[in-house]
Image (spheres, grey):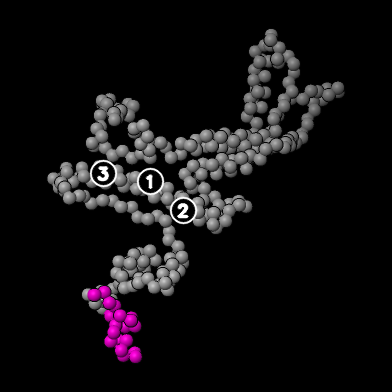
Amino acid sequence: MCQQPPLGSIDSTTRFIPIEKSLLFRTSAAKGNPEGRAILRTAYVAWWRKKRLEEIEATGVERDLVGIPLIGVPPELFASDAGSQQRSALEQWKNIGRNLRVDEQACVIYPLDYTEEGNQTVKIELASASGNRLFDTGSIIERYSTQIAMTVLADVILIGHGSMGSFALAESKQGLFFTAMQQFLTSVAEVINTHAIPRLFDLNGMARPEGYPRFAPGIIKQTDTSALTESLERLGRAGMPLFPDASLEAHLRGILGLPEPSDEDEQLVSPDGRDQRPGFPDNEDQQLGLE
C-alpha cells in the first residue's frame, strides 16, 4: 500500500509499505479485497434513515411548540418596483420568521396602524400552536435502532426494553452474539500466529522449524454453572469415573472460578493418582479404620 503524508507536511513523498511489514486484519477475503467488508456495512441504510428521522423529529417538536410563523406585511413590499427601503423591510420580516425560536427571550414586535382618532394602538397577546402527528416517530426510530443492533447480532441488549422478550430468547441470542465475537477473535489471532510471530522470530534470528508459540483467545461464552454441576452429577450417577482426574479438576476449577490447590494438597496425592487427603475413599487405610 502507498501512504500519503498529511496535507501541509513539508515532506510530501508518498511512502510505499510492503505487505511483508504489515498485518492485514479484515472480516472477509472475498475477491481478494484488502479492505474486507465493514461489520456495520449492512447497517448504513438503517442508520441514515434513523439520523434523518431524528432531525425531522427535532424540527417537528420545535415547530409544534413555536408553530409556523405567518407574518402579514403590506402588499407593496412584494411589488416588482419596490424601493430599497421596502425590500429592506421585507428582508427584516423574513429574518424574524427564520430566526423565531421559543426561548427565554422569544418575542415578536411589529408596528400597528393608528386608530381612527389618530392614537397608536398597542396589542399584547400570546401566540400558540397545536399540531398532531400522523406517525409515531419514536417507534420508527426504535425499529431502525433494533435493525442496527441486529446487523452485529447485538440485539440481545435490547431485550427487556420493550414488552417482548423472554429468558430463553435472550439466552439464544446471547449465544449467537458470543459465537460471532469468538469468530472475530479467532481471525485476529490467526493473522498474528501466521504472520506476526514467525516474522518476529526470524528478525531476531530465532527461526524454529518445529513451530512457534501461538496466541489462543479464551472462551467468551459464559458457562452455566448450574447446568454444569447437574451434568457432572448425572454422569457420576451413571457410573462414569470422573475423579480423581487432575486435568479435569483443573479445567472445572477454571470454569467455576475456584482457587488452585495448595502445595500441601498436591503432596497428599500419590503418584498413581489416588487422593490421600482425609475423608477421601482412595485412602485404603482410612477405609479400614472406618470399618
Say which of 124 and 267 sits in front. 267
Q: Are marks 3 and 1 in contact (CB under 8 Å)?
A: no
Q: Nearer the viewer, residue 113 or 59?
A: 59
Mark-to-mark CA distance, 2 and 3: 28 Å
At 51% from the left edge and 44% from the top edge, which residue is drawn?
A: 150
Task: Look at 78% across and 30% down and name the residue there.
Answer: 122
Residue at the far front in the pictured view: 239
Q: Secondary structure at mark 1?
A: helix
Location of the C terminus by quadrant is bottom left
* Disc 3 residue crowd, few under 14, some 14–19, many 20+, Cα 10 Å: few
Picture residue at 63% right of the left edge, 27% below the top: 98
Relative horizontal placement of residue 169, taking residue 88 as reference (left or right): left
Whether 275 is among the magenta residues is yes
Residue 173, percent from left and from top: 50, 51
x and y percentages locating residue 31 in the rendered image:
36, 31
Please tell me whether residue 155 is drawn above or below residue 248 in the rendered image: above
Which residues fall within the magenta stretch? 272-291
Which residue position is annotated with label 2? 175
